[in-house]
Amino acid sequence: MKTLYLECGMGAAGDMLTAALLELIDDRQGFIESMNALGLPGVRVRAVPSVKCGITGTRVEVTVDGAEEESLDAHGHDRQLHSDPVENGHDHEHGGHGSAQHGHGHHHHASAADLEALIDGLPVPERVKADAKAVYALIADAESRVHGCPVGEIHFHEVGTMDAVADVVGVCLLMEQIAPEQVIASPVHVGSGHVHYMHGILPVPAPATALILKGIPVYGGQVSGELCTPTGAALLRHFVSRFGDRPLMKTLAIGYGMGKKGFPQANCVRAFLGESEGQLESIAVLECNLDDMTGEDIAFAMERLFQDGARDVFTQPIGMKKSRPGVLLSAICLPEDADRLAETMMKHTTTLGIRRKDMSRYTIARSEGTVETSFGSVRVKRACGMGVERAKPEYDDIAELAKKHGVPLDVIRRELQHDKAGF
C-alpha cells in the first residue's frame, strides 16, 4: 500500500508541508512552473535550498507583488489567513486570531465564498479544487465558532490571502500527484506560550487551530511560540486518516520541508513515502473478571460494547478465587475510545474494576467488494499485505441466498470459487 507519513515534530504549516511533499516528486521545477501558471493575482512561487541543524531541505517562498509575507509566529515563515467577522464594512475590535501581526497596511477582505469562487476558477483538476475548498471550509468553520458568528460573515484579510491560497492549492496538487493510498501523521507539536496577533495576545495553539485539531493527538511545552498554524492544522485534518507511530514500511523517498526560523531542533516537516504491507496500529485492551453474571447478561454486555465501537469483544473461561469458575471479558478498541468503552463495560457488567493494556498490533489492508452470482449479489471481504492475500465471502449474504433458493451454503460457495477467480 502506497503510504505517506508526515512527521510533525516541529508542528505544521502550509509552506512547510508544500516543501516536504515537493521533495518527494521528480519534476520539482515543473511543479513550481505549474504553480506560477495558476494565475493567482500577484503570486510567484519558488523553491530554495535550506539548511537546518546541518540537514538540507527545501523552503518554499511565496511572494505577492514581490513581497514575502512576514509573521511573528515561532517559525517566522507561515503566511496565515487572518480572519474577522465583518459588520458594515468594519472589523469587530475583538475579532481575529488566525494570523500573526503583519507589516502591510491595507485591509481588504475576501469572504469564504470569494475564496471558493477563486479556487473554482483555477486551472487544476476537480479533485484538487474539492480538496482545497474542503480545507478552507474547515478553517472558516473554526473561525466562525471562535467568533460566534455564521460562516457567511467570516472574511479573510487580503493580507496573506493569496499566498495562503498558494500553500493550500500547492499541497492539494502534490497530494493528487503523489496519490498515496493512506496518509498517516505523527502527533502534532503545537508549541507553547503566547503569540502577538493583530488584536492582542493569544494563547498557543490559537483558538481556531485548537478547534481544528480537536480529537487529534497534540503536545506542546518544548518550544515557545506557535508551531502549528490554522492552515497547517486544516491540511492535516483533511488529508490524514490516522495519527500515531510511523508504520512498518519500505521507504522510497524522504522530503524535508523547512521553516524560515532556526531552532536547536531542525525546523521542518519530514515526509516519508513508501510501501506499507502491514500497518502497526495502536490499540487498547479492556478486560474484567466476572463470576456472578448469566450467559445472557454477558452476551448483552458484549453486544453493547460492539455497538459503542469496540473492534472485537470476546470471552474466555477462567478460574477465580475460592475455586469459582468465571469468565474473562475482553474488548479491543482504539485508544481514543477506551474511556468511553470502559464506561460501557462498567455499566453493563457487575465488575468493580477494569484493567487496561495499551499495545500495538499489525494489520493488513482490507477492502470489500460485491460479486454477482446466478443466485444474487454476495459481498466479499479482501485482505492483502505482509506476504498474504485473502478473500472471504460474507456469511450473512450466502446464508440469505441459500434460504431464498433452498440450496446448501456450499452450492453458493462453490460457484464463487469456481466461477469467480480469487474467491
Image (spheres, rainbow, N blue to C red):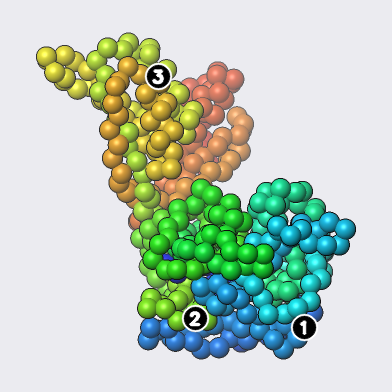
| Image location of residue 86, percent across then percent down | 81, 58
| Image location of residue 244, percent across then percent down | 41, 55
Mark 3: amino acid: His
Q: Secondary structure at mark 3?
A: helix
Q: Quadrant of residue 85?
A: bottom right
Task: Please give the name of the residue rendered at 39% of the width and 66% of the height, measured from the top-left corner.
Answer: 222
Task: Please give the name of the residue rendered at 49% of the width and 36% of the height, measured from the top-left corner.
Answer: 393
Q: In the rendered view, does 324 fall on the left or right side of 18?
A: left
Q: CA distance from mark 2 to mark 3?
A: 54 Å
Q: Secondary structure at mark 1?
A: loop
Q: Say whether disc 1 or disc 2 marks the residue closer to the N-terminus.
A: 1
Residue lying at the far right in this picture: please name it.
88
**Discs 2/3, front:** 2
Q: Quadrant of residue 209?
A: bottom right
| Up-down relation of residue 54 to residue 347 (above or below) | below
Q: Say whether disc 3 or disc 1 marks the residue closer to the N-terminus.
A: 1
Residue 261: which disc? 2
Task: Please give the name of the residue rendered at 49% of the width and 52% of the height, measured from the top-left corner.
Answer: 216
Give the residue pinned by disc 1. Answer: 42
| Image location of residue 384, percent across then percent down | 42, 52
Q: In the rendered view, does 50 fall on the left or right side of 291?
A: right
Residue lying at the far left in this picture: please name it.
322
Give the residue pinned by disc 3. Answer: 348
Determine crowd level at label 3: few under 14, some 14-19, many 20+ residues with C-alpha closer than 10 A.
some
Mark 2: amino acid: Lys
Q: Say whether disc 2 or disc 3 marks the residue closer to the N-terminus.
A: 2
Q: Quadrant of residue 14?
A: bottom right
Q: CA distance from mark 1 to mark 2?
A: 25 Å
| Residue closer to the observer: 417 or 37 | 37
Q: Is residue 105 visible?
A: yes
